[in-house]
């Protein structure tokens, strides 16, 4: 294994009937290992996803159970050919190994790689049309069961040993209640339909329709077939702005000329401006299957193009099983070779400069946490600038006088409301220490909640205003007509670091 694992588990470790073998992947909050069954029962191999215990307290364990509740619920209730299978859930009981004692373990079907890693290694793969048909079939199976995936993207499509595709990572999945479902207000902007980019967030989360999965499928299909996104822009923020302009009718959808005619019409119908105009998944599946059977390779480009930074970043976010919504830093294939991935030191370079002192160990957390928010002003550069101003990236900061701790200077009673990925408060007030893997995503969630509450008429850089509201409150920023006087020194710091950390031409 290369680099630190969120949950280090030694080779040969036993949990239930399973023996841990080779590491597969790791993310900020979880690590995945190949495992073999020792009691002779089937299946003989699986992927074990270990979720850490943190402090090992019941509160921490309950928090981790909440983070995977949606995924486990869907796995338990749905068994479909195109959905990754969960065999069991386990809890480690090992008082002699306190770093693992109490850890939650999901026993999952073993995959070979993700679609993201395939696209990074082989853009426009020949098997692309057939894989798209299987992905669409998986969506149809979900929608027939009245569930919405909510976060379809290449990292959440896994490829099995026989080359077939499975949908995975159901942290955002939700069961339909009439025409809608409710999901957390965090998703991947490139695959989020425009009507959800600025949607109101209620107490139960964000209302979502099955048409959101159809939009995501259209984006994914365009990427698989042409190695490009259907909306223009060199960064997720730029493409998000293009999606909004398209939805408002101020810009047209300009699909790649490399698309065959049948796929062009399919993708155009998936990416209709309004949810009501988008294709339903059942007739969409029939069209996709027909197009896949008669597929021909897209026309080659006249000249080679450099790989898009966002696709390289997707390779760095490859997952065997999604580690609580965060990208996996490495992937080991079945033959022991590793697929190329972006280095943590350069992760998200298009949005966060690599030469200004942002610690490499936090880059993936910073970039992915910002991407989980659909508010355009919550950027990786903003999160990094605030962490610099708050703590100088000190993960062990302790300020008992002000009751603030960790890299984001969280007050325990405030962190309670932002530490859960599904947007619900923790049952009890957490106690420090607060690790970066908990503090940084919580900061991004709080900023995502603040952003739409600031008065749109306020002058100045909205990112700086968001930072000031983090230090005081959005009500006080609105009442002051900008940054309150007592917060100006802090806001000036954030503005300076924002300028340092933002790449030329970025935001």
Image (cartoon, grey):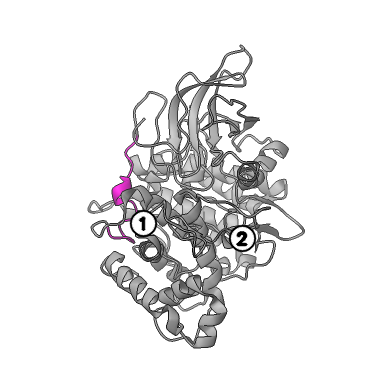
Q: Is residue 483 above or below residue 215?
A: below
Q: Percent from the top left, x then y, of residue 427?
A: 68, 53
User: Which is more N-terminal, label 1 or label 2?
Assistant: 1
Would you name the residue on which mark 2 appears?
Answer: 417
Tell me the residue at 64%/45% (across/down).
59
Question: How many labels sit on residues?
Answer: 2
How packed is label 1: few (under 14 Cα within 10 Å), some, or many (20 or more)?
many
Is 6 in front, or is 101? 101
Q: Is residue 62 above or below residue 19?
A: below
Tell me the quarter of the image containing the N terminus.
Answer: top left
Is 144 in front, or is 189? 189
For the stretch drawn in magenta, what is the main secondary structure? loop
How packed is label 2: few (under 14 Cα within 10 Å), some, or many (20 or more)?
some
Q: Percent from the top left, x then y, of residue 447?
A: 50, 67
Question: Alpha carbon of mark 2 to alpha carbon of mark 1: how far?
Answer: 22 Å
Label number found at residue 393? 1
Q: Is residue 344 above or below residue 264?
A: above
Tell me the quarter of the image containing the C terminus.
Answer: bottom left
Q: Is residue 451 magenta?
A: no
Q: Percent from the top left, x then y, of residue 104?
A: 60, 35
| SS type, badge 1 | loop
Is 255 in front, or is 111? 111
Tell me the residue at 56%/76% (across/down).
453
What range of the chain is rendered magenta? 339-353
């Amino acid at each position: 294994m290369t680099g630190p694992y969120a949950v280090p588990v030694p080779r040969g470790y036993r949990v239930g009937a399973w023996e841990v073998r080779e590491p597969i992947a790791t993310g900020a909050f979880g690590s995945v290992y190949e495992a073999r069954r020792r009691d002779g029962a089937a299946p003989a191999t699986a992927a074990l996803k270990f979720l850490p215990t943190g402090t090992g307290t019941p509160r921490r364990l309950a928090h981790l159970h909440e983070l995977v509740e949606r995924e486990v619920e869907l796995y338990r209730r749905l068994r479909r050919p195109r959905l990754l299978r969960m065999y069991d859930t386990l809890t480690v009981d090992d008082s002699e190994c306190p770093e693992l004692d109490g850890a939650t373990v999901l026993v999952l079907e073993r995959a070979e790689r993700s679609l993201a890693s395939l696209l990074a290694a082989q853009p426009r793969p020949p098997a692309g049309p057939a894989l798209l048909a299987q992905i669409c079939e998986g969506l149809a199976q979900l929608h027939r069961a009245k569930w919405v995936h909510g976060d379809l993207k290449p990292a959440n499509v896994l490829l099995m040993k026989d080359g077939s595709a499975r949908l995975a990572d159901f942290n955002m999945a939700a069961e339909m209640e009439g025409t809608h479902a409710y999901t957390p207000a965090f998703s991947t902007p490139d695959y989020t339909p425009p009507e959800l980019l600025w949607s109101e967030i209620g107490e139960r989360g964000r209302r979502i329709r099955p048409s959101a999965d159809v939009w995501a499928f259209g984006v994914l299909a365009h990427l698989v077939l042409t190695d490009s996104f259907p909306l223009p822009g060199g960064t997720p923020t730029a493409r998000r702005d293009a999606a909004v302009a398209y939805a408002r009718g101020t810009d047209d959808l300009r699909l790649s000329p490399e698309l065959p005619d049948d796929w062009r019409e399919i993708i155009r119908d998936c990416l209709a401006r309004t949810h009501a105009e988008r294709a339903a998944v059942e007739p969409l599946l029939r069209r996709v299957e027909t197009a896949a059977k008669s597929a021909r390779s897209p026309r080659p480009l006249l000249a080679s193009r450099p790989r898009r930074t966002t696709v390289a970043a997707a390779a760095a976010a490859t997952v065997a099983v999604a580690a609580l919504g965060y990208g996996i830093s490495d992937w080991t294939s079945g033959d022991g070779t590793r697929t190329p991935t972006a280095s943590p030191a350069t992760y998200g370079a298009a949005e966060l400069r690599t030469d200004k002192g942002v610690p490499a160990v936090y880059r993936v957390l910073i970039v992915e946490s910002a991407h989980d928010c659909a508010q355009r002003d919550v950027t990786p550069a903003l999160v990094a600038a605030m962490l610099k101003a708050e703590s100088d990236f000190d993960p062990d900061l302790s300020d008992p006088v002000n009751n603030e701790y960790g890299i984001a200077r969280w007050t325990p009673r405030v962190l309670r409301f932002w530490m859960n990925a599904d947007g619900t408060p923790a049952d009890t007030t957490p106690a420090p220490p607060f690790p970066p893997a908990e503090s940084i995503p919580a900061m991004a969630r709080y900023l995502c909640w603040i952003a739409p509450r600031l008065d749109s008429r306020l002058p100045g850089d909205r990112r700086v205003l968001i930072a000031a509201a983090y230090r005081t409150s959005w009500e006080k920023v609105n009442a002051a007509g900008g940054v309150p006087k007592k917060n100006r020194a802090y806001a000036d710091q954030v503005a300076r670091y924002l300028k340092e950390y933002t790449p030329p031409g970025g935001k």
